[in-house]
């Protein structure tokens, strides 16, 4: 107890590794050679021969960190035993007996070297050493070295936590999938505008039972609508009559053959249900097809065909775990994976021991893409069909205002903080040659999920803030954004391809170099804890351990195959910490209730979003039922909503009213996200969050209000965000996903209530809990 009190009185010293001799990157140099090297640069990875000495160098400094020692206490090691087990580990490292005891294969040793490669990333080194400690201390051969220092009960608690968090054989967790014959995995890979989803969608349309899993609710909604209306031509069908393609699809189906028809054909119509994190549309109780976001994929039911879109997302730090579950656990005979070439080696590695047959189909870009000979010298050079890309919200609005002032061309606008429906409507304005919106200004959000008829991409910069400093955007990001150029067809001056350029002459060679680089293979797939594993970890931790500690265990204890890495859990840990502060002393929430509240899609770093979520929790504890309007009113979001909705419906609002509405844009974006979070919770905690219909209606009204505000910032006499009448909207938002709206067709309006987790194919039955279902955030 004395040791615990001592730690409590002082702030734990964060682990910062000592700097060893190695070349340090210069992130601010404008010299071309340095910048080109920056595009390619990776820290030098230590060799296997250097690994033992590197561990001996790093471990002593790591062992003195207050963060490391307090974490061991949170993980259940008695405070008095922490320095003793650490010292035993250090002695074993000094004699090189740790690696000798564990007898790692070569690929695992190489992975440890990779994790220790960059002393600028202390968290990676901390994780690598902590995992190494837990596996060594859990090994039977280490017991003689630990027994003289600590009691057997301490060793057993270390072993139990390591055992419960062990994910080294990740594919074996999907028993239903592994019980069936190996799958046929067909990868469709290529750049943007290559038609890589062509054959996958046709196979899905022809399947007896199938599922589409996409990265965005908007894409899931589009596939759902098109399958129901017969707009996707099934594989094996060769229509003899002429077919007009739909130019407004967001699907990368290409133009080689017509896959997505402009008009539906009853012969090809297939009943398909929609399942996203916050929306369920049931066309038939036992519909053979489902369109969903990746987070909502079920591994319980055997299918004929599953299509997983944007497969490169399995390496995404925050959402990649859902793609990994879908790829490894998809219970189907034929699995189609669509995305970038960079994902091919990693997918092969993930499935190397499953017996699956892997076929790779590669696609070339359908229209040429070239880098312009010179940059755009000033904004007067902006033309119809151009898209100017910027990387901050304020820059996007300022650029929009300046283009409209200099050229007289009206600009549509797209960035991640906008709801998906609003982004889609802005894209339609830009695509429509008669709308009057001939230029697009957007962020990197244009890179996925939108059909944009862009002739020329113009980078306003090739660096963006990482929260601390300006960093060069990666070559894959440059390629993805640049690849949007050339997928056009509605502008009068179209040519045979797309063009990429920049506003800054110094950026043009960087873009050219990035586009010339070969695809950089993805190295690691992300993994998130499944419910079964989470419950095991909770049982191995000290009683009443905070939920944030479970997420910590996933990062610092879990043993994984070298091709996996844990999903980033900073948001989850922050949310868990705030929730447990809020419920302290209140009514006791069940483990399931707390889990769903913690998993809700909330940006905990935004003060307004956090206040709103905590208000939901307060009302849920106190009143059992959360009145969504009352909660929004108490945190101050309802007033802005009602004011802007009222003003937007006026025939001639005053200039002061429009200014106020424009300055409420950020609050409307936060409000929309919190309505989405409420709807997400309404499918999981149905009694407590029972105002789903109210939230759905408010969400649709908010989308209309945001769209109206954006329109109010364009055109002559508008109240722009870059005008003397108003300031930029306060509190720039981070990119985030919006929700899906409902269409007006009868089959889109038929909804059936079901208990969560939702049964994708048997809507009338409550699904059994297996622990293999990933909570759907999207």
Image (cartoon, rainbow, N blue to C red):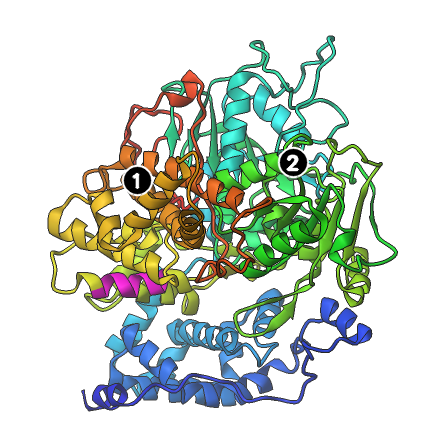
Task: Residue at 74%, 23% (x, y): give it.
Answer: 257
Position in image of residue 672 (x %, y %) = 38, 46
Q: Residue furthest right?
A: 373
Q: Let me know if residue 764 appears in the view.
A: yes
Residue 716 lies in the magenta-colored region: no
Residue 466, picture quadrant: bottom right
In the rendered image, the vertical position of residue 616 relative to residue 75, given as above or below:
above
- Horizontal relation, residue 210 to residue 580: left or right: right
The mark found on residue 436 in the picture is: 2
Region of the chain picked out in magenta, as a range: 572-581
In front: 545, or 616?
A: 616
Residue 575 lies in the magenta-colored region: yes
Circle 2 SS class: loop
Position in image of residue 747 (x %, y %) = 42, 18
Q: Let me know if residue 184 appears in the view.
A: no
The mark found on residue 253 in the picture is: none
Residue 151, picture quadrant: bottom left
In front: 386, or 411?
A: 411
Give the prevailing secondary structure in the magenta stretch.
helix
In the rendered image, the vertical position of residue 402 relative to residue 45, given as above or below:
above
Which residue carries the number 1 mark? 769
- Horizontal relation, residue 618 to residue 156: left or right: left
Task: Give the number of the mark in front: 2 or 1.
Answer: 2
Position in image of residue 633 (x %, y %) = 24, 50
In front: 227, or 130?
A: 227
In the rendered image, the vertical position of residue 674 relative to residue 199, given as above or below:
below
């Amino acid at each position: 107890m004395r040791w615990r009190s001592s730690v409590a009185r002082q702030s734990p010293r964060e682990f910062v590794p000592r700097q060893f001799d190695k070349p340090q990157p210069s992130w601010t140099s404008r010299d071309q050679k340095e910048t080109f090297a920056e595009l390619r640069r990776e820290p030098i990875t230590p060799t296997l021969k250097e690994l033992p000495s590197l561990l001996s160098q790093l471990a002593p400094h790591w062992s003195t960190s207050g963060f490391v020692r307090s974490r061991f206490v949170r993980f259940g090691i008695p405070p008095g035993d922490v320095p003793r087990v650490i010292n035993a580990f250090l002695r074993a490292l000094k004699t090189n007996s740790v690696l000798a005891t564990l007898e790692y294969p070569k690929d695992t040793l190489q992975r440890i070297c990779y994790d220790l490669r960059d002393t600028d990333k202390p968290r990676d080194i901390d994780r690598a050493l902590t995992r190494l400690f837990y596996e060594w201390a859990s090994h039977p051969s280490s017991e003689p070295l630990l027994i003289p220092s600590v009691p057997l009960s301490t060793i057993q608690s270390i072993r139990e936590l390591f055992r419960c968090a062990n994910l080294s054989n990740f594919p074996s967790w999907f028993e239903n999938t592994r019980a069936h014959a190996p799958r046929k995995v067909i990868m469709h890979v290529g750049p943007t505008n290559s038609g890589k989803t062509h054959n996958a969608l046709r196979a899905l349309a022809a399947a007896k039972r199938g599922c589409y899993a996409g990265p965005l609710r908007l894409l899931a909604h589009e596939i759902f609508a098109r399958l129901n209306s017969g707009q996707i031509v099934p594989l094996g069908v060769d229509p003899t009559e002429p077919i007009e393609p739909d130019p407004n699809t967001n699907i990368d189906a290409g133009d080689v053959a017509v896959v997505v028809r402009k008009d539906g054909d009853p012969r090809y119509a297939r009943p398909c249900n929609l399942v996203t994190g916050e929306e369920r549309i049931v066309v038939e109780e036992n519909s053979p097809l489902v369109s969903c976001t990746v987070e909502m994929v079920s591994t319980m039911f055997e299918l004929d065909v599953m299509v997983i879109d944007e497969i490169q997302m399995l390496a995404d730090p925050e959402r990649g775990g859902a793609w990994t579950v879908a790829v490894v656990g998809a219970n189907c005979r034929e699995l189609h994976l669509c995305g970038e070439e960079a994902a091919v080696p990693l997918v092969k590695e993930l499935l190397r021991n499953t017996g699956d047959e892997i076929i790779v189909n590669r696609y070339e870009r359908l229209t040429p893409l070239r880098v312009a000979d010179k940059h755009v010298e000033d904004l007067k050079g902006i033309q119809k069909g151009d898209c100017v890309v910027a990387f901050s919200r304020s820059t996007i609005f300022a650029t929009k205002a300046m283009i409209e002032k200099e050229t007289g061309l009206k600009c549509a606008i797209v960035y991640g903080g906008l709801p998906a429906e609003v982004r889609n409507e802005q894209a339609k304005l830009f695509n429509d040659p008669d709308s009057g919106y001939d230029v697009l200004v957007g962020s990197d959000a244009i890179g996925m999920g939108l059909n944009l008829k862009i002739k020329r991409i113009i980078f306003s910069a090739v660096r963006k803030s990482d929260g601390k400093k300006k960093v060069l955007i990666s070559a894959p990001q440059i390629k993805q954004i640049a690849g949007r150029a050339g997928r056009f067809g509605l502008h009068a001056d179209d040519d045979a391809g797309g063009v990429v350029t920049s506003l800054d002459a110094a950026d043009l060679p960087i873009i050219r170099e990035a586009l010339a680089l070969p695809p950089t293979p993805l190295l690691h797939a992300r993994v998130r804890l499944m419910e079964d594993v989470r419950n095991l970890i909770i049982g191995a931790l000290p009683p009443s351990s905070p939920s944030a500690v479970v997420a910590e265990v996933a990062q610092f204890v879990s043993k994984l195959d070298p091709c996996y890495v844990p999903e980033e859990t900073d948001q989850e840990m922050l949310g868990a910490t705030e929730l447990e502060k809020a419920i302290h002393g209140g009514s006791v929430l069940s483990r399931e209730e707390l889990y769903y509240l913690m998993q809700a899609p909330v940006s905990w770093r935004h003060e307004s979003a956090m206040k709103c979520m905590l208000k939901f929790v307060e009302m849920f504890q106190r009143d059992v039922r959360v009145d969504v309007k009352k909660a929004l009113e108490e945190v101050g979001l309802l007033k802005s909503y009602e004011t802007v909705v009222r003003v937007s419906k006026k025939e001639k609002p005053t200039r002061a009213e429009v200014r106020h509405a424009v300055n409420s844009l950020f609050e409307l974006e936060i409000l929309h996200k919190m309505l989405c979070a409420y709807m997400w919770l309404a499918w999981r905690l149905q009694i407590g969050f029972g105002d789903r219909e109210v939230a759905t209606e408010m969400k649709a009204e908010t989308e209309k209000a945001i769209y109206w505000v954006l329109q109010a910032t364009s055109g002559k006499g508008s109240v722009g965000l870059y005008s003397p009448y108003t300031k930029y909207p306060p509190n720039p938002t981070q990119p985030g996903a919006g929700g899906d709206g409902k269409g007006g067709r009868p089959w889109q309006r038929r909804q059936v209530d079901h208990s969560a987790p939702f049964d994708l194919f048997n809507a009338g039955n409550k699904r059994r809990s297996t622990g293999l279902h990933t909570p759907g955030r999207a």
